[in-house]
Image (tube, rainbow, N blue to C red):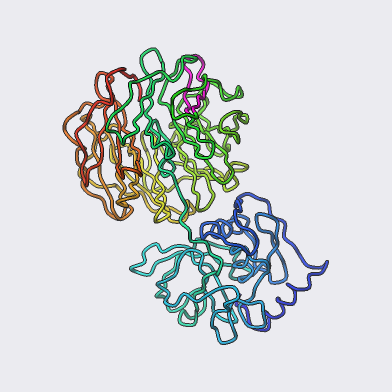
Amino acid sequence: MARTKRSALASLAAVTALTAATTVTGLVASTSASATSSVGGAISPGEMMSRAQFWVANSVPYNQGAYAADPEGTTYREDCSGFVSMAWHLGTSLVVTDGGPSFTNSDGSPNTTYDTGIGAFTNLQQGDAMAYPHDHIWLFDNWTNKATGDFTYYAESNPSDPTHGPTAANINNSSLEGWPTSGYVGLRYKNVDTTPVTINSGNTTDSTYSVYNPDSKTMTLFGVGSGGHLGFTKSTNGGASWSNWAEANAYWTLQGTPDALYDPDAKTTLLFARGSANGAMGISTSNNSGASWSNWTQMNAYWSNFKGDASAVYNPDTKKITVFARGGDGRIGYTQSSNAGASWSNWSEVNAYWNNFASDPHAIYNPYTKQITVFARGGDGRIGYTQSANDGASWSNWSEVNAYWNNFQGDPHVLLNPDTKKITLFARGGDGRIGYTQSGNDGASWSNWSEVNAYWNGFKGDPRPVYNASTKTVSLLARGGDGRIGYTQSGNDGASWSNWSEANAYWNNFQADPTAVYDPDTAQDTTFALGSGGHLGYSQSVGSGWTNWSEVNAYWTLVNP
């Protein structure tokens, strides 16, 4: 419903003189947003969108006479301008006309008390508002194709349409949200914080058996040797040389592939692996770059008999670590630690909407939207996901990513591009082809599955992505049916891909899937894979190619990377 000047002024009076008769909608936090901003303070575009999504998730209706809460309990008017005020975390619900406090002046120009004009619509960035003076305002989300004008947005529109988004539109349309496009003015919040979010290299992909410590500039690699003993080797010179394999500790014998995570606040590397005795999930930690390790201990005793390997994420805002794993009954469980792994919550099921999972979970934390997303393959071969925007306090129901492909094999793997803020999910189809799907709105919607390219097929292993922040290039590596490691690259975040090529021909007959890690100090990607005979090799990115495979060192032979 359009906001006329008269109704806007009437609503303004309601802002300044709330009475006991005012309706306040109570929200159930099915989806929340973790606030790092203060009321009226600097706020990132990612947090704006997380707050917008909160009202969408709670189906806040349009009602100029009612108020609804934000994630922290502050209330805002349930109309278009109240919604944008909430998303920007303002101290009051503005209106879209003069008469103060307002988004625009009477002539339609920006009201510089709160915002500034962006000029051409091509300058729109995430979190900006589009105001039709005296009548309507909504929130710009992301360009989905800037060249053609396609984008997504969030809005409160009318009583028959609760808060909605991300909604697709085109900036070249003659009208947007029912008003002539030519009459809109683009606004940017004066306190928007566009400081880039720092993501350490391990947080752009789901965690794995290699990890980079940016404080000590150390790459560490883990693997399970014969007898189930877990070893590690490390390099402090960008992979030019490696320490001898050494056992992390001898308290447990293990199975499966270990998972490593670096906590930059506690300066601690955490290692998770499944015990061979009863499938219990264990943890060992080091706070001196691997010089010594704590004894293996069971994370907690609430679950055991795990069927698969762990996936861990770190939330730098709450300093909390969340670990996911697949139980023997095919359910996905999680446990959390707020003290760098010293203690853990009981294992809990993520949610009960799906079960009988056939793959391990793979999780990623998005620091822009403060949201954790977990992916796994169901027993029916479909890829599902669940999300939490309140650091695991609650989870959305499992949903299928999309239905364009099914009958997937193996595990899905995920990458977050810190430059485009886009999530890309990769998985191997039942026909041995590698597919991918993308989301530019943190999982609210997904593109159709597409084949990365058709130059190779018959893949035997799962695809593993790595993002090079120096070259802005995504590299995807996977093991072919002939045991060779192939790679494909994209310099435009998945819009197109190079043909699959062999990483190099120095080794072949690989026995396990590769993993890769980015070293920001050398600006190189390093990929690791288990060769025949249990020898672990590595190759490093050089321009658009890779160095010859070399053995990390010959001190151990491995049964699992």
Dominant secondary-structure state across the stretch colored magenta:
strand
**How many marks overall?**
0
Q: Which residues are magenta?
A: 271-286
Q: Nearer the viewer, residue 27 or 277?
A: 277
Residue lying at 57% horizontally and 62% vertically, measured from the top left: 42
Instruction: Indicate yes or no whether the magenta region holds residue 281.
Output: yes
Query: In the shown orientation, is residue 388 left or right of residue 28?
Result: left
Q: Nearer the viewer, residue 503 or 251?
A: 251
- The quarter of the picture where the N terminus appears is bottom right
Query: In the shown orientation, is residue 334 left or right of residue 406?
Result: right
The x, y position of residue 547, in whole percent, is: 20, 37
On screen, residue 156 above or below 542? below
The x, y position of residue 33, in whole percent, is: 60, 52
The quadrant in which residue 51 appears is: bottom right
Residue lying at 44% horizontally and 18% vertically, measured from the top left: 254
On screen, residue 485 above or below 299? below
